[in-house]
Image (cartoon, helix red, strand yellow):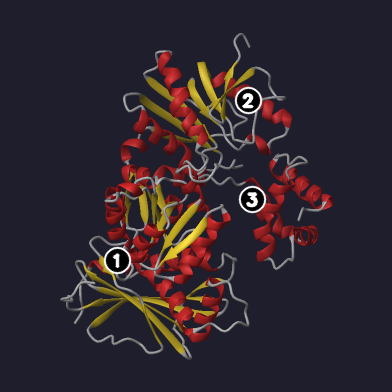
C-alpha cells in the first residue's frame, strides 16, 4: 500500500514548515513507514486516514515531525562503510603519513557511530592516534552519548557479540563502553548550517543519513562547509541512499567493495 | 527473618518494569498504550496461573514468579503462536508459551546481579508454588490490554543444596 | 540454505524459525542439544544453528562444545539465542566456539543484522 499523494503533500509541507527539511517525491515510503506506528496507536486504519485526522488535530503535529526527523542509529548495522574505513580509507591515510586521525562524526545521535569508529580503529589500526569530534543538534542525545552506556536491546542490535564483549562491560542493566575509547571522543552541540566544529581540519567526516532530509540548496551548503573542514586528502562518508552527484561536483566518488566514499577533487 | 542479599538492588521495581516492557515490545506487541505500569495495591487475580523459574547455585538462590489470569495466559499464548482470538490454546502450548515468558524474564533479571547462578526450567501451575522459606524482594505489576501481569522476585533464606 | 533451530520452547522455535524462513532458510528443529546433534548427523547441509542455552537433556552450551569437536561441522555458524545475558556467559559461549550471541528478547532485525555480519544473508541497504 502506498500513501495517497495529497496525504504525502500535507505531511511534506508540515515537516518543511517545522524543520526546514524537504521531503521530496520518492520519499513516500519514508513517510509511510515512519507514520504507520503512529497511525496504529491512534487507532487509524491506515496512514492516509491518520493524515486526515492531522488536518483537524494540530496537537499531533509535533509527534509527526519528530517521527520523520529522528534517525535511528545502530553500531555496525550498515557494515559496508566501516569495512571501507578499515580496508581502504585508513590504509590510504597511513600512506599519506598520517599517524593521528582526526574524525568528525556529524549528527551522531546517541553515539553509536563515533563509538563504532573508535572500535574500528582500536581493533584494526591500534597504533594510530585518534580524536573524534562527535556532534549533534540535540543536547538530549548528546548527554546520552557522553555516558557511553547502552541497554541490552541497544547492544543486541547491530553490534557483533565479539565486539561487544571486547569493548563493553556490563554494569547492571547497561553495557558501558571502555573509558579509553570514550576519552577519544569529544561530544559537542552543533548545527550543520553553522561553521564546522573545532577539532579539525578532519581527515575523515561521517555525515550519514542527514542530507536526505534537506533540500538541494541546503545539501549544497552543508557539503561546502564539510569540504572546507576537511584536511587535504581527507574523506567523506555519506549514507547509503545519499550522494554528492548532481548536487556538488567538487567531489569525486571512490567506490570499493560495494561502498562509496567521497573526496574533494583536485583544484576545486 | 530478613535476608540481606545482592538481589536487593532489585528492590526498586523499575528494572523489572523495563524488562517487562522490552519483552512485550519485542515479543508480544509494541503498541503504545497496551502495556501500562501498575502502581498501588495489587488486586486479586481470578483463575490465576503461576509460572516460575529458580536461580540456583550462585551467591544467593532466588525465584522469579509471574502471576496472571489464565485468560491472560491464553491471550499471550495466542499472540506467541500466532493463533486467532477464538482459537483454543492446548494445555501443552499454554505451558510452553507462558513458561518461555518467565524464562526470558528470569534470565534478564539474573543478568542484573553478579554471580547469580543458573536458571531452572520453568514450571507452570494453576496453584501458587510453596513459598515457605522465601522472602519477597519486589513485586512489579503491569497491565497488558487491561489484564494484570505481575512479576515478583523472591530470595531463599537458606541456600539450596542442589544445583540445576 | 538450511538452519537448525534448537530450543526447548516450541514458541521460540516458531519465532526464530519464522525469521530464518523469511530470509530464505529451510528450517529444521530440535528441542535440546542431544536431539540437535542427531539432526546434524541427518542433515549434512546445515549452515547455521540458532541455539538456546537452558534446555533439558543437553544444554546449548554443551551442544556447542560437542559440535566444535567435530571436524566435519567446523564450517557451521553457531549463534546463541538465549535469555542468558551476563557478560561472562557471552564470553564463555564465544570461547567455546559460538560465533554470535543474541540475548532474548529480540526483534527480528537483531537476528537478520547478525546474519548479515556473518555473511549468511546479503547485506541490505539501510536508510
Q: Does any portion of residue B103 appear in the rendered image?
A: yes
Q: Count neighbours of disc 2 (C-alpha within 10 A) and say few if under 14, some if 14 to 19, many if 20 or more.
A: many
Q: Could you say which disc has been placed on residue A66 in the image?
A: 3
Task: Tell me the residue at 49%/25% (across/down).
Answer: A204
Give the chain of mark 3: A
The N terminus of chain A appears in which quarter of the rendering?
bottom right
The percent position of residue A257, horizontal first and vertical second, equals 53, 29
* Tags 2 and 1 on a common chain: no
Is disc 2 placed on a helix, strand or loop?
Answer: helix
Q: Could you say which disc has been placed on residue C58 in the image?
A: 1
Task: Tell me the residue at 44%/64% (across/down).
Answer: C29
Instruction: Report whether B80 appears left or right of A167.
Output: right
Is disc 1 placed on a helix, strand or loop?
Answer: loop
Is disc 3 placed on a helix, strand or loop?
Answer: helix
The percent position of residue B33, horizontal first and vertical second, equals 59, 69
Asked where in the image residue C81 lies, by quadrant, the reply is: bottom left
Q: Could you say which disc has been placed on residue A223 in the image?
A: 2
Amino acid at each position: 500500500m502506498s500513501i495517497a499523494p495529497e496525504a504525502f503533500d500535507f505531511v511534506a509541507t508540515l515537516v518543511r514548515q517545522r524543520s526546514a527539511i524537504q521531503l521530496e517525491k520518492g520519499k513516500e515510503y519514508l513517510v509511510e513507514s515512519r507514520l504507520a506506528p503512529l497511525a496504529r496507536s491512534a487507532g487509524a486504519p491506515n496512514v492516509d486516514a491518520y493524515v486526515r485526522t492531522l488536518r483537524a488535530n494540530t496537537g499531533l503535529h509535533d509527534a509527526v515531525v519528530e517521527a520523520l526527523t529522528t534517525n535511528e542509529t545502530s553500531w555496525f548495522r550498515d557494515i559496508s562503510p566501516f569495512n571501507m574505513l578499515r580496508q581502504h580509507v585508513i590504509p590510504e591515510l597511513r600512506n599519506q603519513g598520517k599517524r593521528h586521525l582526526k574524525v568528525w562524526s556529524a549528527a551522531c545521535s546517541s553515539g553509536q557511530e563515533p563509538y563504532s569508529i573508535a572500535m574500528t580503529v582500536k581493533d584494526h589500526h591500534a597504533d594510530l592516534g585518534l580524536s573524534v569530534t562527535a556532534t549533534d543538534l540535540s543536547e538530549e542525545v548528546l548527554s546520552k552519548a557522553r555516558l557511553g552506556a547502552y541497554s541490552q536491546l541497544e547492544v543486541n542490535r547491530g553490534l557483533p557479540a565479539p565486539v561487544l564483549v571486547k569493548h563493553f562491560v556490563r554494569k547492571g542493566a547497561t553495557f558501558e563502553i571502555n573509558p579509553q575509547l570514550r576519552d577519544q571522543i569529544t561530544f559537542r552541540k552543533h548545527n550543520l548550517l553553522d561553521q564546522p566544529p573545532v577539532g579539525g581540519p578532519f581527515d575523515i567526516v561521517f555525515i550519514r543519513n542527514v542530507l536526505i532530509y534537506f533540500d538541494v540548496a541546503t545539501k549544497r551548503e552543508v557539503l561546502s562547509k564539510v569540504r572546507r573542514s576537511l584536511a587535504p586528502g581527507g574523506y567523506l562518508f555519506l549514507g547509503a541512499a545519499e550522494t554528492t552527484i548532481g548536487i556538488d561536483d567538487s567531489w569525486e566518488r571512490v567506490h570499493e567493495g560495494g561502498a562509496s566514499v567521497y573526496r574533494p577533487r583536485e583544484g576545486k | 527473618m530478613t535476608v540481606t542479599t545482592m538481589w536487593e538492588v532489585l528492590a526498586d521495581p523499575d528494572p523489572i518494569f523495563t524488562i517487562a516492557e522490552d519483552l512485550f515490545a519485542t515479543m508480544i506487541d509494541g503498541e503504545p498504550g497496551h502495556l501500562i505500569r501498575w502502581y498501588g495495591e495489587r488486586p486479586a487475580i481470578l483463575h490465576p496461573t503461576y509460572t516460575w523459574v529458580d536461580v540456583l547455585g550462585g551467591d544467593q538462590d532466588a525465584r522469579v514468579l509471574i502471576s496472571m489470569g489464565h485468560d491472560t495466559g491464553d491471550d499471550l499464548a495466542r499472540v506467541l503462536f500466532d493463533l486467532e482470538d477464538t482459537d483454543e490454546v492446548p494445555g501443552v502450548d499454554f505451558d510452553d508459551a507462558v513458561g518461555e515468558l518467565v524464562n526470558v524474564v528470569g534470565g534478564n533479571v539474573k543478568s542484573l546481579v553478579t554471580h547469580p547462578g543458573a536458571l531452572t526450567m520453568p514450571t507452570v501451575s494453576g496453584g501458587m508454588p510453596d513459598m515457605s522459606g522465601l522472602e519477597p524482594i519486589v513485586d512489579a505489576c503491569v497491565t497488558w490490554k487491561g489484564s494484570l501481569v505481575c512479576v515478583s522476585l523472591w530470595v531463599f533464606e537458606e541456600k539450596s543444596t542442589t544445583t540445576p | 540454505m538450511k538452519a537448525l533451530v534448537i530450543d526447548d520452547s516450541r514458541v521460540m522455535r516458531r519465532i526464530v524459525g519464522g525469521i530464518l524462513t523469511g530470509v530464505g532458510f529451510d528450517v529444521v528443529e530440535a528441542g535440546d542439544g542431544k536431539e540437535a546433534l542427531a539432526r546434524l548427523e541427518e542433515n549434512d547441509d546445515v549452515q547455521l544453528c540458532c541455539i538456546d542455552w537452558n534446555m533439558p537433556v543437553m544444554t546449548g552450551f554443551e551442544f556447542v562444545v560437542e559440535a566444535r569437536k567435530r571436524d566435519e561441522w567446523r564450517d557451521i555458524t553457531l549463534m546463541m539465542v538465549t535469555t542468558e545475558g551476563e557478560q561472562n556467559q557471552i564470553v564463555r559461549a564465544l570461547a567455546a566456539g559460538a560465533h554470535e550471541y543474541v540475548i532474548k528478547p529480540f526483534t527480528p532485525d537483531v537476528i537478520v543484522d547478525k546474519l548479515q555480519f556473518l555473511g549468511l544473508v546479503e547485506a541490505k541497504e539501510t536508510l
